[in-house]
Amino acid sequence: MEKVVLITGASAGLGEEFARQLAQKGFSLLLVARREERLFTLQQQLCLQYPDLVIHSFCVDLRDDLAGQQIIDYLQSNALSLVGLINNAGFGQRGLFSEIDVNTHLDMLQVNIRSLVALTYLAIAEFEVELSFIVNVASTAAFQAGPNLAVYYASKAFVLSFSEALHEELKEKQIQVSALCPGATNTEFAQVADLSGSLLFRLRVMEKQAVVDYALANLHKAIVIPGGVNKFGALMAQLSPRSITRKLAYYIQK
Ligand SMILES: NC(=O)c1ccc[n+]([C@@H]2O[C@H](COP(=O)([O-])OP(=O)(O)OC[C@H]3O[C@@H](n4cnc5c(N)ncnc54)[C@H](OP(=O)(O)O)[C@@H]3O)[C@@H](O)[C@H]2O)c1
C-alpha cells in the first residue's frame, strides 16, 4: 500500500502550499478540492518535479455529507493508506449574520466543521496504525468572537477546541494533532470572504510559504500560531476582556 498525506482544499492558498512543501519533504499525496483543473495542474506539476512520488487528486464538494466516506473509498480502492491528514479546506463570508443567506452559514459549518470531524473520525478508524499526524486549520479568529464574520469565528473556535482535545486523546496512539492558527494570510481567502478591503487585511498579511513552513515544523504542538504579531494578538485576546476583543474584531473587519 502506498502511504499518502491527504490535503483538503489543495486547489489554492495554504492547501496548495502544504502540497508543495510536503512533496518536497518526500511525501506522496492525495489532493482534494472542487476545482478539477486546478487540482490536475498541481498534480501534473508535482508529478514532473518529483517522479518518485505518487500524487493523486480527487474532486469532491465537502458540503456534501457523503464527501468524507467518498474520500476514504477513493483511498481504499487505490490501495492508499494515510500517514497524514491536513484538514485545511474552509471559507468565510463577511457581513451581518442576518443579512447573509442562511445556506451560506450552513455550508460554512459543513465545510469548516462537519467535514473536518467526519474525515478525522474516518481517517482514525481506517488508518489508526499508519496515521502519524493531523493538522486542523483553525485561525487566530478562534480566540475571540467576530462580529461581521460571526459563524466563521465560531467555526474556528470549534476547530481549535476539538483539535486540542484530540491532541491529548491521540497521544497514546502516537498520532500528533495540531490546530494551525494563522492570522491574515495572502491567499484567495480574503477575496472569497469579501475581506480584501478590510483593515484586517490592509494591516499586515503573512505569506503562505511561511505559515506552512512553520506548521510543518511544529506538528508536535497542540496549538500552532505562525508569526510574532499573530502570537501576540492571540495572547492578548486570551488575556483581555471578551467585551473588548469582540469589539476590536468588529472594528478591523468592518
Ligand atoms: N488566508 C487567511 O487569511 C486565513 C487565516 C486564517 C485561517 N485560514 C484558513 O485557512 C484555510 C485555507 O484557506 P486559504 O487561506 O488557503 O483560502 P483559499 O485560498 O480560498 O483556499 C481555500 C481552499 O478550500 C477549498 N474549499 C472551499 N470550499 C470547499 C468545498 N465546499 N469543498 C471542497 N473544498 C473546498 C478551496 O477549493 P475549491 O474552491 O477548489 O473547492 C480551496 O482549495 C481555511 O480553513 C481558512 O479558514 C485562512
Image (spheres, rainbow, N blue to C red):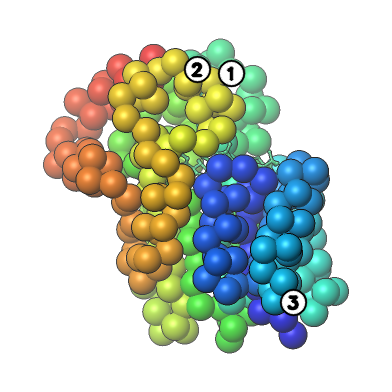
Specify the farthest residue to the right. 77
Quick check: which quadrant has ligand 1?
top right
Q: Is mark 3 on a helix, strand or loop?
A: strand
Q: In which quarter of the image is residue 50?
A: bottom right
Q: What residue type is labelled 1?
A: Ile
Q: What residue type is labelled 2?
A: Gly
One can see residue 69 in this view = no
Closer to viewer: mark 3 or mark 1: 3
Marked residue nearer the N-terminal end (2 or 1):
2
Q: Distance between the residues labelled 3 and 1?
A: 40 Å
Query: Residue 216 appears at what percent x and percent y?
Result: 43, 64
Q: Distance between the residues labelled 2 and 1?
A: 6 Å
Callouts 3 and 2 close, C-beta under 8 Å: no
Mark 2 residue crowding within 10 angstroms, few (<14) / some (14–19) / many (20+): some
Q: In which quarter of the image is residue 221?
A: bottom left
Marked residue nearer the N-terminal end (3 or 2):
3
Q: Is mark 1 on a helix, strand or loop?
A: loop
Residue for badge 3: 80
Q: What element carries label 2?
A: loop
Marked residue nearer the N-terminal end (3 or 1):
3
Residue drawn at x 26%, y 21% is: 247
Residue drawn at x 27%, y 42% is: 230
Callouts 2 and 1 close, C-beta under 8 Å: yes
* Label of residue 100 in the image: 1
